[in-house]
Amino acid sequence: MGGAGRTGGPPGRGPGSPAGLGRRFAAIAIDWVACLLIGRLFSDSQWTPLLIFAAENIVLLPTLGSTFGMRVVRIGVRSLDGGRPLSPLPALVRTLLLCVVVPAVIWDSQYRGLHDRAVRSVVVNLR
């Protein structure tokens, strides 16, 4: 990714810089509420929203580089290897770990959760 600092990570501010926790939480809240609403249309199962959330991430991360909620708050997921959106397999692994929740609440100085570290990705500001 262009503008990387001495550590080889993304730049400190602006496009490509690590997204803050506020935007990340807002994005996941938007995604989760949307999945809850869509899930209610199709099923009363408590698992339906989680399955929709997983499908959203598995499909949209490799194709658009961000989920619906991420688009709203202008953040996206990029590979540390070239700054491109994730390919399908890393998107699947990241999503499965994110659905377990624990990896997502343990993060480093760039707010990279264990799910991001496992697939060498980072959530970045798009603007």
Image: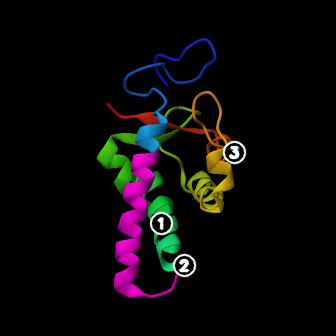
Question: Mark 2 highlights which residue?
Answer: 47
Q: CA distance from mark 2 to mark 3?
A: 25 Å
Residue 52: percent from left, percent from top: 46, 71
Whether residue 87 is visible to the viewer of this picture, yes or no, is yes
> Which of pointers 1 and 3 indicates the residue nearer the eye?
1
What residue range appears in magenta? 25-47
80 to 36, vertically: above or below: above
Q: Which mark is residue 118?
A: 3
> Which of pointers 2 and 3 indicates the residue nearer the eye?
2
Of pointers 1 and 3, the one earlier in the residue sequence: 1
Identify residue type, mark 3. Answer: Ala
Helix, strand or loop at label 2? It is: loop
91 to 3, vertically: above or below: below
Residue at x 40% of width, y 48% of height:
26
Helix, strand or loop at label 1? It is: helix
Of pointers 2 and 1, the one earlier in the residue sequence: 2
Q: Which mark is residue 53?
A: 1
Is residue 116 covered in magenta? Answer: no
Side of 33 relative to 114 (left or right): left
Q: CA distance from mark 1 to mark 3?
A: 20 Å
How crowded is the residue under tag 3: few (<14 C-alpha within 10 Å), some, or many (20+)?
A: some
Q: Looking at the magenta stretch, what is its main secondary structure? A: helix
36 to 67, vertically: above or below: below
Residue at x 47% of width, y 73% of height:
49
Q: CA distance from mark 2 to mark 1?
A: 10 Å
Residue at x 41% of width, y 72% of height:
36
